[in-house]
C-alpha cells in the first residue's frame, strides 16, 4: 500500500551532509527526467523498453515516473523515513481511500478513458478482462508463494539486520495495528485493485516488468532500506509475471489475497489449512495451464 502521502516531505533534523545529498539527488533526477524531452534519449530508452518514443503521452509518463521514483529514492536514502512514519497517526480507512483512489484515477486517465478509449477499450488495454478459472487458481496459489517469500525476507532481516527489522516491525504495527475488520478488508481490496490498475495495467505494458516493479517498490517507503523492501520488489515481479502471462484481473486477485493474509496473519490450524489449500491451488493451476496449452496446440495443428 502506498502511504507516501503520510510522511513529511523532508525531515527538519537532517544533517548538512544528508540535506546536501537530498537536494543533489532531487536535482539529478530532475535533470534526468527533463532528458525525456529529447527524442534521441527517448529512442535510446525505447530500444529496450516497450514504449513509443514519438508518443507524447508515453514521454510524459516517463517524466512523471522518474520524478516519482527519484523523490522516493532520495527520501529513503537521505532521511529516516521510519522516524517520520512513527510520528504520523495510525492509518485509517479514510487514509487508505485517499491514498489509493488517486492511483486508480492516474491509471484510468493515463490510458485515455473517455479521451481516446471508451470503457470497454480501457478495460482491455488495462488487462481487466474476464479470467479463466485457472487464472484465479494461479493467482491464489501465488499468494501462498509470496507469503513464504515475505516470511523468508523477514527472517533474513531479523537474522542479518535485527535493528532495522525491529524498527520496521514497530513502524508497521504503529501504522496498521489499529485497523479492525473493515480496515483490513479495505487494505486488501483497495491497493489490490488501484495499484494493480496503475502499475500492472497501465504502466507495465509500456515500462516493462522490471522498471514497473521498481516503481511499485518505491512507493512503499514505510519499509525504508530493509529486507521487507526486497520482499516488496520480489512480490512486484511475481505480480508482473501474473499480469504478463494471464491478465490484470488475476494480478488484482493475487495482490488482494496477499494483503488479506498479511492483515489477518496465519497461525495454528489456520496455517495448516492454508498449506493444504496452497497445494490444491497449485495442482489446479497446473492442470488448468496444461489443458490450456493442450487446447492451443490442438487448435494450431493442421
Image (cartoon, helix red, strand yellow):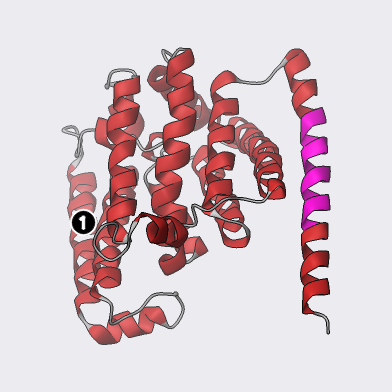
**Seen in the image, is 245 located left or right of residue 66?**
right
Q: Is residue 297 above or below residue 134?
A: below
Task: Name the quadrant containing residue 86.
Answer: top left
Q: Is residue 275 above or below residue 215?
A: above
Q: Is residue 117 visible?
A: yes
Q: Residue at x 60, y 27 (%)?
A: 261
Task: Name the quadrant containing residue 214.
Answer: bottom left
Residue 289 located within the stretch drawn in magenta: yes
Q: How many marks?
A: 1
* Location of residue 217 in the rendering, given as x and y in whole percent from the top left corner: 44, 48
Comparing 124 with 29, the one in front is 124
Comparing 125 with 31, the one in front is 125
Residue at the extreme bottom: 40
Element type where label 1 sits in the image: helix
Image quadrant in which the N terminus is located: top left
* Location of residue 50 in the rendering, given as x and y in whole percent from the top left corner: 44, 75
**Seen in the image, is 296 located left or right of residue 30?**
right
The crowd level at tag 1 (other Cα within 10 Å; few <14, some 14-19, many 20+) is some
* Location of residue 121 in the rendering, given as x and y in whole percent from the top left corner: 40, 61
* Location of residue 268 in the rendering, given as x and y in whole percent from the top left corner: 75, 14
Task: Name the quadrant containing residue 64.
Answer: bottom left
Report the magenta residues as a range.
276-290
Q: Is residue 79 visible?
A: no
Q: Residue at x 82, y 29 (%)?
A: 276
Magenta region's main secondary structure? helix
**Seen in the image, is 275 located left or right of residue 62?**
right
Image quadrant in which the C terminus is located: bottom right
Q: Is residue 269 above or below residue 60?
A: above
The residue singled out by tag 1 in the image is 26
Residue 248 located within the stretch drawn in magenta: no
Amino acid at each position: 500500500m502506498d502511504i507516501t502521502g503520510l510522511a513529511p516531505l523532508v525531515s527538519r533534523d537532517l544533517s548538512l551532509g544528508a540535506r546536501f545529498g537530498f537536494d543533489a539527488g532531487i536535482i539529478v533526477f530532475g535533470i534526468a527526467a527533463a532528458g525525456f524531452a529529447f527524442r534521441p534519449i527517448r529512442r535510446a530508452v525505447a530500444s529496450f523498453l516497450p514504449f513509443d518514443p514519438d508518443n507524447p503521452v508515453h514521454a510524459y509518463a516517463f517524466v512523471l515516473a522518474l520524478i516519482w521514483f527519484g523523490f522516493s529514492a532520495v527520501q529513503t536514502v537521505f532521511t529516516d523515513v521510519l522516524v517520520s512514519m512513527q510520528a504520523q497517526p495510525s492509518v485509517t480507512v479514510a487514509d487508505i481511500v485517499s491514498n489509493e483512489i488517486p492511483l486508480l484515477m492516474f491509471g484510468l486517465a493515463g490510458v485515455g478513458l473517455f479521451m481516446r478509449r471508451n470503457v470497454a477499450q480501457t478495460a482491455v488495454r488495462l488487462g481487466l478482462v474476464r479470467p479463466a478459472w485457472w487464472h484465479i487458481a494461479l493467482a491464489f496459489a501465488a499468494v501462498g508463494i509470496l507469503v513464504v517469500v515475505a516470511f523468508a525476507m523477514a527472517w533474513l532481516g531479523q537474522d542479518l539486520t535485527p535493528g532495522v527489522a525491529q524498527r520496521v516491525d514497530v513502524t508497521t504495527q504503529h501504522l496498521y495495528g489499529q485497523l479492525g475488520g473493515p480496515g483490513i478488508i479495505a487494505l486488501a481490496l483497495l491497493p489490490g485493485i488501484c495499484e494493480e490498475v496503475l502499475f500492472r495495467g497501465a504502466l507495465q505494458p509500456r515500462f516493462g516488468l522490471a522498471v514497473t516493479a521498481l516503481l511499485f517498490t518505491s512507493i512503499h517507503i514505510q519499509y525504508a532500506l530493509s529486507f521487507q523492501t526486497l520482499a516488496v520488489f520480489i512480490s512486484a515481479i511475481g505480480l508482473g509475471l501474473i499480469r504478463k502471462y494471464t491478465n490484470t484481473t488475476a494480478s488484482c486477485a493475487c495482490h488482494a489475497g496477499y494483503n488479506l493474509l498479511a492483515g489477518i496473519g496465519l497461525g495454528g490450524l489456520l496455517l495448516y489449512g492454508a498449506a493444504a489449500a496452497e497445494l490444491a491451488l497449485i495442482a489446479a493451476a497446473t492442470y488448468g495451464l496444461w489443458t490450456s496449452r493442450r487446447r492451443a496446440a490442438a487448435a494450431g495443428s493442421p
